[in-house]
Image (cartoon, helix red, strand yellow):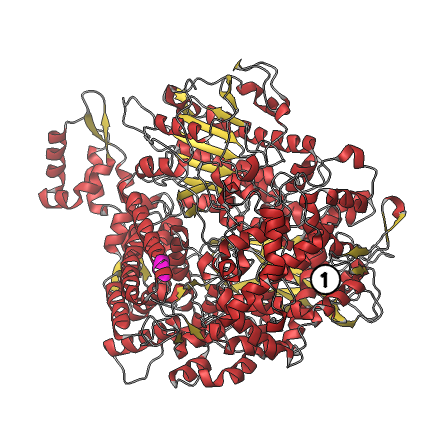
Amino acid sequence: MNVRGTPCRWHRKKGSTIVTKPTSRRTVLRGLGAVVALPWLEAMTPRPVMAAGAARHPLRMAVLYMPMGTKMIDWTPPETGALPENLPLNLRSMAALRKDFSVITGLRTPSGLDGAALHSHAMSTFLTGAAMRPTEGPDIRNGASADQIAAKAVGGQTYLPSLQMGTFAVNRTIEPGFNPAYLNLSWRDSVTPVRPATSPREVFDRLFTRSAGAESRSTRARHRSILDYVREEANSLESDLGAQDRRRLDQYLTSIREVEQQIQRVERMPAPTTPKMNVPDGDWSRWVERWQEQVRVQADLMVLAFQADLTRVCTFALEIERSVRVFRELGIRDDYHGVSHGNEDDLSRIAAYQVAQFAYVVEKMKQVREGDGTLLDHSMMVFGSAMSNGGHNTTNLPILLAGRGCGTLKPGRHFRFSRETPLSNLWVSLLDRMDVRVDKLGDSRGRLSDL
Amino acid sequence: MRWMSSTLILLAGTGLPVRADEAPNFDQIIGPFLTKHCVQCHGETKPKGDIALHQFKDEASVLKGRKTWVNVIDQIRAGSMPPKGRPRPEAKEVEALVRAVTETFDRFDRAAKPDPGRVTMRRLSRNEYVNTIRDLVGVQLIVDDSLFPPDEVGLGFYNLGEFQSISAQHMDRYIQLAELITKSAIVVGKRSDLPPLDDQCWRESDGRGNPRSPRFFPPPPPGNKGNPSFRELKDKEPISARFAFSTGPLQGGMFRLTWQLKSVAAGDEVAKCRILLDGKEVARGDVVASKEWKQYEFFFPIKPGEHTLGIALQNPFTDPTDASKRRELHVHRDKVVLSGPLVPDAQAFLLSAPGDLTGEARSRYVLERFATRAFRRPASKEEVDRLLKIAKQAQTRTRYSLSDAVIDWFQEPKVPKQVVDKLRSLESRGPFDQEELTRQLQEKLGKELFEEHRAAIFEAVETVGTPPKLVVKSVARLSEPRLPKAATNQLRQFVQRGAMDEDTFEQVLADTLGGHWRSHRDTIFAKADKSPEPWEGAMAFAMQAALCSPKFLFRVEVESGTPGQQPQVLDDYALASRLSYFLWSSMPDQELIDLAAKKQLHSNLAAQVKRMLADPRAQQSLYEDFAEPWLGLRQLRNVNPEPKLLTNDPRREAEAAQHFRDVLREDMLTETRMFFQEIVREDRSVLDLIDGKFTYLNLRLAQHYQHAFPGLKNDVFTRVDLEKVPRGGVLTHGSVLTITSMPSRTSVPKRGAWVLERMLGTPPPPPPADVPELGKEKEETANLSLRKRLERHRTDAACAGCHARMDGIGFALENFDAVGRFRVREGKDDKNPIDVTGELPSGVKVEGPAGLKKYLRDQKHMFARCFAEKMLTFAVGRRLDTYDKRSVDGILRSLESNDYRFSALATAIVQSDPFRMRRGKDQR
């Protein structure tokens, strides 16, 4: 990472000599982080989103995920209807945005045995509502997730069909009995999880490295001929393979096709401007101690992607289920998963901390003017968890819905649905607003009216 | 039903094959248990959960219902069945049932038709990719998270084919990486005129599969060439000096850094410096204390583009008794030279061909050899043809270069002097409309001269007023050079650079010219000298393509001639790859390929295993790719214990936490690494993993453990004998003890579960869904000791079964705190003596670490089975299945009759059917 302009402090002796005076490496890294924190957002020229006079702005959908739930009493407004000025403890950071979001309670995800579900179970079904198969083996099964259904329908119109983000690589946490693939939110189809980008650098790369600004026509031509070559190579293999191998080869061919499509999109679409910023750090270990900063840098990139219409669909797992992160900045000693089973009050504080990040990004969206409204007006932003509390309870989930959805949402209220209402009803309702008609998503049984 | 994935059913028991006369009786155990506890609900009429158990009337029916039985045993063991409110079977009853069912299936499996199994083709894992590139092309990649997506983990390992996937993100990175790799290995066009790397250089491989260990060496005299533009950066400590630079017109590749350094001594260590590229360590070395500047030299790869380069003292030290005595690193700010990219000798190797070959024959030779190495088997004619085709495509591309003549042209005035002079009289006249101005100009210049310079002249014409009129302004502007002097001067450097591909040319010029680039781009491209892509570039491009082929990225095992319905013996090339990726995590070397070509590998397996285990690559990769995942140690980098555990001084907590992350954690991993590597290197018994009476420590780690050993230093790990301290075996390593703890305290069940899963192969099932974990009932139990709380936890029947197994083991390790220090007391002011007695469900008492190790030693058959199964899983890249049981038995017999030596295990695995053979593609 380039750190030109970092404030200086060093010691000289005798002209050309520099004497080391040891301090911690962390000081420096903090400094680096500060450089990353986005001075460029305003400087960035948004891509013209639509022709002059066009009536509609594109509708964006973002889903931010919080694992392990909260203490619901700290979350739930006492009454339904308009949100009170005095918001519940967890939602205090959203006070200034009271007219911009709604609280939704009462929804549920599909449950496992006895009305409860394990962490992987909950997280994987958050956006799918599917009857997932609990397995540790490769025989995973879930369902297509709402964001991917949306991406399939509207993703062709943008440079990146959808963006997935996380803060922690899923292969770093294991829940006994579950394939770690189940710690993914987004699922292309019932057997294909979509891996999130888990560092600001990776998010940056997904948004900008194949953009026309960073890659030239001749590079694309070279990459195209390589793709043609490897397709022939793959085809020449096919007859030799057993059934399992052929499936893997199909996956390989799909990935080739997707890269090609990506190249085509770049050529078809006006070039997104690569923002003038220092490319953020990709080394996960540098971010692990700076969760909030990581979340905010990535959230900023998401806002930027929406603003420049690089994508319209985004999922962001602020943490994963069974996370072992220790939120020392909150003065909490145990790891997150441990807290979720041990200390409701600390769990609630961690939830509030994550809501504060949601508030940050909603506020940011609200500041971006678009046409005669704001980016937030043209978005539907969901924040929520697939568990209501640390007891593995998957009913009465904590859900927030922000934005006006291009005039289709009336935020500022508290909706309470009956306890058996599937969360997938919400997704179907949001997909409707994106003109993506699905009759059923997982266990959905209709739509949520009057949002 | 797969065994390792879902349950203990097939693994529980003694670890030894069952003899027929011990055969359990359905009528005596299984039947009565069902009648007593199950069929009331799971019977004929409306069986709950559609599980009907009344149908199991004899052994044959049990064998048919395997899937159901796996589930049944899981539920019963987990204590979820029989449900709450029903009479609970006694622990003894449950054990007897599990044993009876297990043995029933065991006997059946051992009598079944042999089946070598079939692995799903494996994508090279991240480590395998990096190692293979190192041995294939001679380029060392630096592994980090931005390389490509992290590997999927299945059963703890990163190389199981069935768990892997490949996505567009992978493909994207593979293509880009292949470009970087081939560009680093093969430098096209004019090279830097530095000498090639010689044998002493920092490098891990020479491109022929012969690794060398990285080393730093005192330098030969300096070469002052190719120093890319350096800018000094002002910095915060602890970086001693840092520069920003761009590789500029140079390409990426291996670079040499020479730097004049000296150090001031303090303490008993020599000053060590770290070279940081973009903040990441890429090289380190000792800087001897002296008054004179000395030149030091480092080698490392650099990608093209903008970078920062820094140097820092790695081991700062201040004498505790005299603060003025400090270890210092002095850095000469002017005497730093970065040169490169060096011509890798890999290039000479990759492109070499017999002298009499020319034209296409030469290309064919080079590409065939490369494809054969990259695909790890002879390349077919079609494959080489495809590569030739893509190389030909590359040769149609154009390279661009700037000559002095082109640059001279840009230095000329936009319009010749005589023309400018003639135009002076028109200056500030007008305004004219278009026609009138044209007429005036033609009059002054004559038609011919006007047409020639028409475009340039109109640069001096401006539009004014409405309706628009034209005025000739500042004619003098026309006599300026086409490009400003500063810009053309900068362009001169590229004359040396030679021909560049379109991208590089564009990028380099855009960087140099800044704002001028856009307006002059087309002219420069038109004026630049053009040449076709040279042969080297075409070869590099074909190699780049080959590195994206599925035949390189996946380990494809080509079908041999036998019919697909039959198990087949692997062809020798596939076997060579299995061997090399098992023991080296890399491609086969020449010797393996030669043996495969002669079809002599199958008959030489034992000798090859012996040779390969002696190679440093085996110690490295068997630790990194097998042992570390097996022990779960990759998790350690996620663990950040509470600073309070690391220091008693509240003011130094931040420092202690930092110290743990940067230093201690790595020390802990090094201990386990060196311990395991000795077992491989010295061919020790694998049982040493349980209780070997030695380990490797440095001073820091020994101090952390609070053990005193004479002669330890910080920078060297020394083998120490553990007769006098209560340690030995991986269970007592700080690494293992830390990952099995919570951030703020030890976790008895976690440690127990770790031992059950990783050392005995009998993992406890996941906890039932709706059980609150420790601390939930906090008010009433806050005053109880951890042991008391766990005991209360165990009174819940749903927990009891598994916790008895886990906690019995975990308690015995309570002598070690959450960061691996030995202790005999805990709590506030160390008031409470620690009770380290655990009781297992069988009634066996295990006391303290020594007791636990003795217990495990008594269970050596189980440990050996577990270890062998894990290693076989890693070696064949798939989950084991019931039909593998017979092979595992064979491997164990061989291991046990060879004193449990590591090499006996590796050899037996390599010689086993699952390793040497595979199921036909159409079988079953």
Q: Could you tell me which chain the residue with mark 1 belongs to?
A: B
Q: Where is residue B636 shown, x and y percent of the image?
A: 65, 54
- Element on which disc 1 rests: helix
Q: Disc 1 residue type? A: Leu
Determine if residue A434 is in view: yes
The residue under label 1 is: B731
Q: Main secondary structure of the magenta part?
A: helix
- Residue pictured at 72% horizontal, 60% vertical: B315
For the C terminus of chain B, which image quadrant? bottom left
| Neighbourhood count class around disc 1 (C-alpha, 10 Å): few under 14, some 14–19, many 20 upward | many
In depth, the one of B210 and B836 nearer the eye is B836
Indicate the position of residue B578 as horizontal and vertical percent values: 46, 72
Which of A143/B226 is in front?
A143
Q: Nearer the viewer, residue B923 or B899?
A: B923
Q: Quadrant of residue B700?
A: bottom right
Q: Which residues are magenta?
A: A245-249
| Nearest the eye: B183 or B45 | B45
Is residue B578 one of those drawn in magenta?
A: no
Q: Is residue A105 left or right of residue B740?
A: left
Quarter occupied by residue B85: top right
Decide: is B712 above or below A98: below
Q: Is residue A346 left or right of residue A224?
A: right
Residue in the image at 69% along x and 41% along y: B773
Residue B193 seen in render: no
Q: Height in image: A288 above or below B608?
A: above
Residue B540 in the image: state x and y as whole percent.
Answer: 34, 67
